[in-house]
Structure formats: structure tokens, C-alpha cells
Amino acid sequence: MAVSPEVGAEAAERRAEAVLAQLSSAEKLALLEGDTDFWPGMVDIASRDASHVHPWPAGAVPRLGLAGLQFVDGPRGVVLQGGATTFPPPIARGACWDVDLEERIGEAMAREARSFGANWLAAVCVNLLRHPGWGRAQETYGEDPVLLGDLGAACTRGIQRHAVACVKHLALNSIDSSRFLVDVQVSERVLHELYLPHFRDCVEAGAGSVMSAYNRVNGEWCGQHPELLTAILKQRWGFRGFVVTDFIFGVRDGVAAVRAGQDLEMPFRMIFAGGLEQALADGRLCLDRIDDAVLRQLRVQLAVPQGTYPVSLRGCPEHRALAREAATKAIVLLQNEAPERAPHGAPALLPLDPARSLAVIGPLAAVANLGDRGSSDTRPEPGVVVTPLEGLRAVAAPGAVHHASGEHLQEAIALAARCDTALLVLGLDWRLEGEHIHPGDIAPILRQMPAPHPLLRRWWPPVARAIAALTSYGSARQGGDFAAGDRTQLELPAAQVALIEAVVAANPRTVVVLMGGGAILMEAWRRAVPAILLLWYPGERGGEALADVVFGAVSPSGRLPFAIPTSANHLPPFEPRAPQVHYDLWHGYRRLQRDGHPAAFPFGFGLSYAALRLSAAEAELSPGGPHPALRVGVTLHNDGAMASEGVVQVYVEPPGLVLERPRRTLVGFGRVSLEPGGCQRLSLAIPLRRLAYFDEATSRFWLEAGPHRLRLGQHSEDAGLVVELALAATDLGP
């Protein structure tokens, strides 16, 4: 007989309390740290790339039967070597706008993690993409808190069926190159309206753990931030799981961190080991706080579902089909016109005829381009990844697809000229964007490194300071073996632009396929090219997905998870090495609307091979229950001759009489599948809090009195259909 989650949680709580009562003070303190000593762990990382070899353990107490937690990273798949499926990264899955798909991916990653012996998965990254130059843009779902919240909550639900979901990084972690030093200044209103709702959604979806961030917020390090970790996360939101540090360098002051609400330092015995025991003895730490931290971890550990997870789950046909589905749904068709000099009334260039000759050109066409090489790096087995070239050749007529890397311009021009169509595969890779570390920024933490042997403790501090001082002079080389960090140049590299110009001059029937995680500005060349596709980092089945769309087996249905502007000047200021930044309400599509700058490609935008339209929009207030909501209905039609999926987006235009507010913001969305000539009614429940503003005087969300216009469309600048509701001022709680 199945046991309900509530009953299982109650049993785990009772057992957690019983285990807590049996622990000694030393065992309790040990449970606040990873189970790996610092120096062996660092040697393990340096000598055999340990994060890709085994999970990181914590919380084991063998005498009480506690097997512990086993941590593994996984935003685009389990990062351990041994056959795990590589999915498209979260930014590509953000382009799917598909909650059900994301829940299935979360569940698949959790099942594969369990097959490696891991039961704790850091796959839910919901940091808001404030600027598309952020090096880790690929690890999050986009620029809007509603999109992040719905997809992050879905991934959380999927993971929690089999493992512990780790939601990261709390909070305002959206610059990589200065993440160990930057202080993000933000008002309480901006924090609660823009940068925290998606974390709250994941907590309410049942996340077992939340990871704090490296950066500071309003002067305090996130790893020891009492407002974020205790006042907001644990008290305001009622989070009952545990807080874990970001890895190795996530704590500056161990006592301050624990007092602020930090529950576990990972992956090593490091800062906590150096000071918590003495702080407990001299009264700077109270036992109640230690007990609370331990109990939080125990209740999560003891609630991990039991089960058998065989090695055969890794890369199984079901998961590979899921990776292909995600890669296909993520592809965004940005442009599709008739080629230049084509006869009047000629059809759009895509889809292509697989029997006609195709020149596939570009440096990324025949390589496995999966994303950056930081903590999210996956290690698929040789031969598993289907490149764009391989995917296209598998579907096209024998001998129809020809290839040139583009390294030799004249060769590329000649090939393009003699083929019916040219397809360029260009964009970004790990050398141009990704996770990045400046060693000098972590020198203050390295000064607290534990001694490599107990006999060395007396004279170790000056040695540690000397090591830290030497480190402070260095900086990881951008574009080195790890990753490139943030981007300040948002256009394609000059050589790629030159290749586009040369190929389209030789063959007007040119398709540009872009890979990458962040936005790419295209103003220098987009008007000369009839068709543009965003492939993102497409995961291990990306070549198959590209062929599905290019040759018309599937209508493209991806929608942009961020706006692509016409100029970098339309974006917020972005300095990757800034020691302090100020975040406000204005970024992405909100900023473009405020400043009157139409996007090159709006947030939520994407074309289809079908002809989609909306009709019969309606909305009503459903105030009953603890979470009042709007019920919004609309019908989506497919007037074309090809089956397709469409994404309906609902934006609110508030009265804006109380204070300055964005003119139009996303409050809900839904994805539907349509046969040719078919239609489907979509019904969405939209929490009223998404229409509200945060009032700093009362520290609560308030619904503004007056007319609220709900605009239903297919992107943020779509006139769409409008329903207006007069709503009363309402206190929606903290």
C-alpha cells in the first residue's frame, strides 16, 4: 500500500527527533560538516577530478544506522562519469516553457543520481538572469521570476520523488567573475518582488535543501546572512529543510554562519571544524541552534525514498528520448523568411527538403558542444553525443550533406555556392562563457585552511597566510582550462560574423544556427540572413533535435526565456569585476518597455511552422482558499497544415497608481499541443501574489486597487487579447 508523503514526513520527523536525542555533542558538530577532511579532499580533486568520480558524503553516523547524504551536481545531468544522460542545460529548458517536461527531467536526473549512490542533487539553479552576459546564464531558466519559479518548482518535485533537491544559490548570484567579492545592494521591495519569488516557489514545492551563495547582499555574506537564511527562508517561508554552503569557499566566519542559519558546510571539514567546538564551549553558540541544524538535516536524510536504482538507468532509452524531446522543444525559430532574390510569394526558407544538397559550415557543427566546464560539466561516454552534422546527415538523403569547418574561408564560400542551401553552426562554447574563479578573491578564506596534520596546528597559521598571499597575486586565465566567466562582448566573434557575411553572399539560402547559453546580439548581420535558429547547448541528442526541426518533422516551439535587445546599451550596466552593484526593478523586457526600446526578439518570442492564434479570453477572481488566485481561460487555434505546440503567456498591466511598477509583467503561462486545424482550451490558475507589489512599510504583499489588464499573447510585446478586471486592495500576506 502506498504511503502518502504526509505520513512519510511525519514518520521521518519522529525518527529524526529520536536520533537527535542519541547524538553526542561531538557527533552533532560533525553533522554540520561534510564527511571529507580538507586536505585529502583537495588532493582528490587535484589528482583525479573527484567531483566527476564520486559523490561528496555528509551526515553519516554508522553507529545509529545513518548512511548519510551523498551530494552530486547536475543542472544538465549528473556530472559523474559512467554513462549519465546529458540533457540541455536549464536555459534551453527555460526556452521550452514546459512544466511537465521539466518535472520529468528532474525525476530522470534523480533516478540516475541514485544509480551512482548519490541521493542529493544540486540541479535546481534559479538565479535570475539579470544580464545576458552572466557566464552561468546557461545554468538558470531565464530572466523572469515566474518562469524560473514554475520550472524550478517542477524540477524540484521531480527530484524529490527519488532524492533531495538542492536549490541554489540564495541569493542575487548573477555575476560570476566577482562572485567572491561583490556586494549586491538591493531594496527590500526589489528583493521580494524580483529576486526571491522563484526560491519560494521551490521551497513550497518541497525542496529538501537550499544552497547559499558566495556573494554579499547589502553588506553581509550570503553564507552568514541572518535575514536571508533565517528571517526569510525559515521563518517567513516556513522552510523545514536545511541550508548548505556553496562549496569549499562558502563560509567566511563559521560562528556567524551557524548563528545566521547555516546548517551544513560542504564538502569538507574546514571553517566549521576550526571554531564551532570552542564557540559552543564558551557560549558564543547555543546548543539549541546546533540541534536545530542537525534536526533539519536528519528529517531530510531520513525522508529520502527507499528503492533500487540499477546502473541500467543511466542513459537508458527513456532518458535519451527525454533529452531529445527537450532539445527539440527548446529550439527557437527567430527568423524565417524567403531568401533574398527569391521570386515574389516564395515560401519561407525553412523547413528544408532533405533530398536537396546542404552545406553545413562552422566551427561548432561537428563537435560536442554541451556547455561550460565548471561545476555543471557532464561527461558523456564517447560516441554518445549526436553533433549537428551527425544529426542532419542521419536524416538527409545519402550524400546530400557536405561539411566545412569554416576555418578556410574560400573553401566555405565554394561549398556554400555549389549547394542548394547553406547552414552555419556558430555561437558560443566553454571558452567564451562559463563558471570562473579568480584565486585572489578566495585568499581571505584560504587563510583559514586547516593544518594538514594535528602536530602542525601551532605553527600552521602563518604558513596558511603565506599560501593565501601567494594565491592573491594570481588570477585564473580567462578562456583557460576551467571556463571563461562573464561576457562583456555580446556579439559573435568577428571571425564568425565574417563567415556569415561571406557565406550568405555566396548563397542567399542561408540558415544560421546559434549555440550558447546567453543572449547573442545579431544586428550586424540578421537582416541579411533569411532564417535563424537558436539551438542553445542542446545536450547529447541535439543533432537529432536540429534535424527534426530543420527538415520539418517537428514544428519549432521554443520561446525565448530572455529578451534579445538591439543594443547592449539597452541592458543594465554590467561590470564583471565590480566590488559593488545596485539591483533595481529594471532589467530584461521590463527595462526595454520602460525605456521605449523594442527588442530585436522579445521575451517569450518564437516562430512556428504552423499558424497559431488566440481567441475567447476570459478571467475571473477565485478568492476562496488560503491562496487566492485568478482563473484565466483562452483558446489556442492552429490554422496551419502542420501539427505544432504553442505557448500562451499571460501578462498583467497593473494600475500603477501606488508606486512605480513595470508596465507589463509575466504572471502565468501554459503550453498546449495542437493538430492541424485544431484548437484547445487552456485554463490557468494565477496566484494573486504575482499581480501584487511588496510594501516595505508593512513587509507584506498588497494587491493594488483598480483596473488590472491581463494581456494574453505569444510574447511580451504581443498586443494579443485583453481582459480587464477591477480588483480591490488586498493584503496577500508576507
Image (spheres, helix red, strand yellow):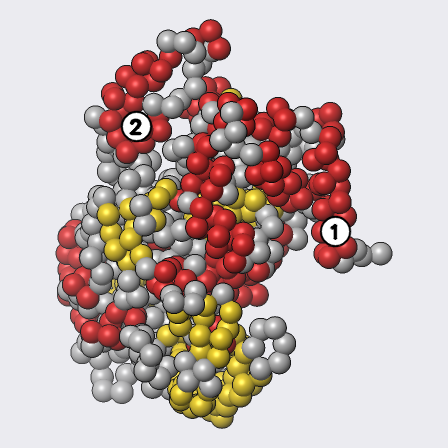
For the point 44% across and 23% down, the residue is: 42
**Near-viewer residue (74 or 657):** 657
Residue 289 marker: none
Residue 356, placed above or below residue 678: above
Q: Residues within 10 Å of mark 1 (few under 14, many from 20)?
A: few
Q: Report x, y in % for residue 713.
A: 40, 82
Residue 205, placed above or below residue 308: below
For the point 59% across and 33% down, the residue is: 287
Q: Residues within 10 Å of mark 2 (few under 14, many from 20)?
A: many
Farthest residue to the top: give it: 455
Q: Report x, y in % for residue 385.
A: 46, 47
Q: Is residue 495 visible?
A: yes
Residue 437, placed above or below residue 25: below
Residue 10 marker: 1
Q: Quadrant of the N terminus?
A: bottom right
| Mark 2 vs mark 1, CA separation in Å | 44 Å
Q: Amino acid at mark 1?
A: Glu
Q: Is residue 294 visible?
A: no
Residue 443 marker: 2
Farthest residue to the front: give it: 283
**Near-viewer residue (70 or 727):** 727
Q: Report x, y in % for residue 521.
A: 22, 62
Q: Is residue 624 left or right of residue 383?
A: right
Look at the numbered disc 1 and give the secondary structure of its residue.
helix
Residue 657, placed above or below residue 462: below
Q: Quadrant of residue 311?
A: top right
Look at the numbered disc 2 and give the secondary structure of its residue.
helix
Q: Is residue 506 left or right of residue 480?
A: left
For the point 44% across and 74% down, the residue is: 702
Earlier-in-chain disc, 2 versus 1: 1
